[in-house]
Image (spheres, rainbow, N blue to C red):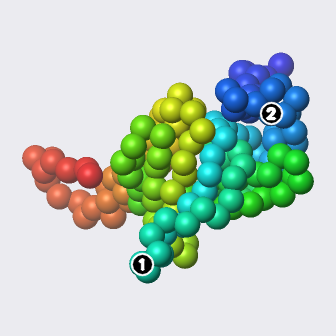
Amino acid sequence: MSNHPPQRRVANIGSLLLTPQENECVFNYLGRKCITLCSAVVQVYGADRSHGWMKRCCGVACLVKDNPQRSYFIRVYDIREGKTLFEQELYNNFTTNCSRAYFISFPGDNCQVGLNFASEEEAKRFRAALGDLLNRRSRRTGMLFAAVSWSNREPSNNTDTVATQ
């Protein structure tokens, strides 16, 4: 008998605006060993210097934990076609700006990207899930930095203190 507790399977979090069947379709588009931490109906905008915000697509935005790629993404799916319309990996030091209750923006790979949510409640849930994820990741990299700093520290007398970031 093993002393390890059984692994808890994390459930996909669907959109409040979609039916259970529509949410299930989105979950099936995620791929093997991928889960969505939050889902919401959105319009995706891109900003360029000359024209301002331009609508790129509409669909269901998912905050995806992609286990095979060992990364997190914002992916927008077309629920009718089952296609990925937009994808942004959450890179190190990823930041968002929330200028309105229903709109978040962030620096994308090619331009500034905006997500315009169909529902303020979904925007609030998505922002919270994204914020929790980014905070967890920054704490983990801070702890990693502290561990590396400690392991690289030269021996000295016991009166020294070590500051961590």
| Residue nearer the viewer, 97 or 132 | 97
Q: Quadrant of the N terminus?
A: top right
Q: How far across and how far down the image is residue 8, in percent?
A: 73, 25
Horizontal side, residue 34 vs residue 62: left or right: right
Q: Measured along the vertical axis of the image, is residue 104 above or below residue 108?
A: above
Q: In the image, what residue type sits under mark 2?
A: Asn
Q: Which mark is residue 23?
A: 2
Horizontal side, residue 146 vs residue 20: left or right: left
Q: Residues within 10 Å of mark 1 (few under 14, many from 20)?
A: few
Q: Residues within 10 Å of mark 2 (few under 14, many from 20)?
A: many
Element marked by disc 2: helix
Q: Quadrant of residue 46?
A: bottom right
Q: How far across and how far down the image is residue 132, in percent?
A: 47, 37
Q: How far across and how far down the image is residue 44, in percent?
A: 60, 57
| Residue nearer the viewer, 51 or 2 | 51
Q: Are marks 1 and 2 in contact (CB under 8 Å)?
A: no
Determine which residue is flagged by label 1: 49
Q: How many marks?
A: 2
Element marked by disc 1: loop
Q: How far across and how far down the image is residue 118, in percent?
A: 60, 39
* Residue in the picture at 67% in, 27% down: 16
Q: Which mark is residue 99?
A: none
Horizontal side, residue 109 vs residue 11: left or right: left
* Residue in the picture at 41% in, 60% down: 93
Horizontal side, residue 67 vs residue 151: left or right: right
Distance in Å between CA atoms under marks 1 and 2: 36 Å
Which badge, 1 or 2, comes first in the chain's sequence?
2
* Residue in the picture at 51% in, 57% down: 114
